[in-house]
Image (tube, rainbow, N blue to C red):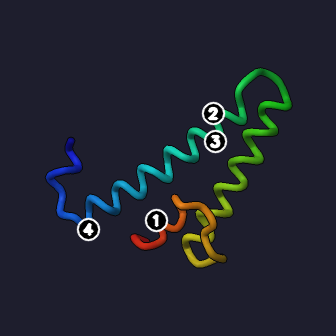
Amino acid sequence: YSFVVLPAHKRSAITAAWDFFRAVDDAVDEAGAGDGAEAREAASVKVGEWRRELAACYGDGVPVTPQGRALVAHI
């Protein structure tokens, strides 16, 4: 509810950032589910994918995820 009182452009930016962060968190949680080296490696791969997506948001390529495309408009 706290986002509702923000001006539209700020609300859009904070929503895009929150959505990006949530997608990264969910991807790492899902990939890293379980114990052992395989889970850590899967989580590491996901982190690398999202790092590349964030770099694309800052001009090192073109974002490919809906979260990256929404975020780039506010960077």
Q: At which x and y percent is residue 42?
A: 78, 39
Q: Is residue 75 above or below residue 38?
A: below
What residue did someone put label 4 on?
9
Mark 4 Cα within 10 Å, few/some/many (few <14, many 20+)?
few
SS for callout 2: helix
Q: Which is more N-terminal, label 1 or label 2?
A: 2
Q: Which mark is residue 70?
A: 1
Alpha carbons under labels 3 and 4: distance apart: 27 Å
Q: Which is more N-terminal, label 4 or label 3?
A: 4
Left or right of residue 33, residue 5 in this image: left
Q: Residue at x 39, y 70 (%)?
A: 74
| Mark 2 residue type | Asp
The one of 1 and 54 positioned closer to us in this rendering: 1
Q: Residue at x 68, y 48 (%)?
A: 47
Q: Are marks 2 and 3 in contact (CB under 8 Å)?
A: yes
What residue did someone put label 3 on?
27
Q: At which x and y percent is residue 16?
A: 41, 58
Q: At which x and y percent is residue 19?
A: 45, 50
Left or right of residue 15, residue 39 in this image: right
Alpha carbons under labels 1 and 3: distance apart: 18 Å
Mark 1 Cα within 10 Å, few/some/many (few <14, many 20+)?
some
| Mark 3 residue type | Ala
